[in-house]
């Protein structure tokens, strides 16, 4: 056999092995891409961050009837009528607020009656009073064993001075 005849089968074998290697590499890339795509779109749930629960819906508790107090103004006695609502998301705190309504009303009446007309004319004065009232309510909740920070807000829903 001549050398040319012997080299032909060797060249054919080299060509087939290169083709096989190329097919193997392409197959590995396709499979690797598919696996990567699966994990990127699905996410590995075993390593995901824990899901954060959305906050519970807000519950508003109106302190009825509205507060009516008199206080000294620059030109004599003044009257203040304020409707107040408390906001919480916690049912335990909501029950504490209802249960201790008389104490809350007492403390807020005392605070409202101690204000001056000149302080309450400005927005800043009303906001300062609202913050003081919220802290007073939180102190009562804390004093009876509740979680004070769960009383999230106090709102004046009506504010009339005359």
Image (cartoon, rainbow, N blue to C red):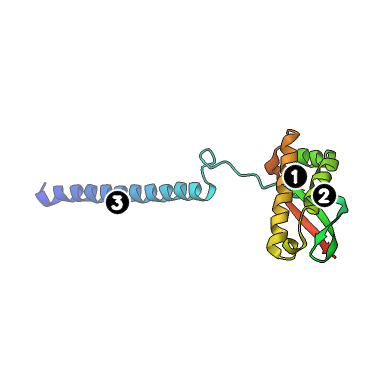
Spot occupied by residue 16 in the image (x, y as percentages of width and height): 27, 49
Spot occupied by residue 126 in the image (x, y as percentages of width and height): 73, 60
Spot occupied by residue 81 in the image (x, y as percentages of width and height): 85, 59
Q: Is residue 115 left or right of residue 49?
A: right
In the picture of the structure, the residue carrying the numbered disc 1 is 137
In this view, the mark in front (1 or 2): 2
Along the line of sight, the residue nearer the viewer: 102 or 16: 102
**Label 1 vs label 3: CA separation?**
80 Å
In the picture of the structure, the residue carrying the numbered disc 2 is 109
Q: Residue at x 81, y 44 (%)?
A: 104
Mark closest to the chain's N terminus, 1 or 2: 2
Mark closest to the chain's N terminus, 1 or 3: 3
In this view, the mark in front (2 or 3): 2
**Label 1 vs label 2: CA separation?**
12 Å
Q: Which numbered dot is residue 19?
A: 3
Name the residue furthest left: 2
Q: Which numbered dot is residue 88?
A: none
Mark 2 and mark 1 in contact (Cβ < 8 Å)? no
Q: How many marks?
A: 3
Label 2: state its secondary structure. Answer: helix
Q: Is residue 76 above or below residue 129?
A: below
Q: Residue at x 74, y 42 (%)?
A: 90
């Amino acid at each position: 056999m001549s050398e040319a005849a012997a080299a032909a089968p060797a060249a054919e074998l080299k060509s087939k092995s290169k083709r096989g290697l190329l097919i193997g590499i392409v197959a590995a890339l396709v499979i690797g891409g598919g696996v990567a795509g699966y994990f990127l779109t699905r996410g590995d749930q075993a390593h995901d961050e824990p899901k954060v629960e959305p906050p519970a819906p807000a519950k508003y508790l109106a302190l009825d009837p509205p507060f009516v107090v008199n206080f000294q103004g620059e030109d004599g006695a003044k009257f203040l009528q304020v409707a107040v609502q408390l906001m919480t998301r916690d049912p335990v705190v909501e029950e504490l607020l209802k249960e201790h309504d008389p104490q809350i009303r007492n403390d807020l009446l005392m605070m409202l009656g101690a204000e001056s007309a000149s302080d309450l004319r400005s927005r800043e004065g009303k906001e300062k009073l609202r913050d003081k009232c919220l802290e007073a309510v939180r102190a009562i909740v804390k004093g009876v064993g509740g979680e004070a920070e769960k009383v999230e807000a106090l709102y004046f829903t009506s504010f009339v001075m005359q």
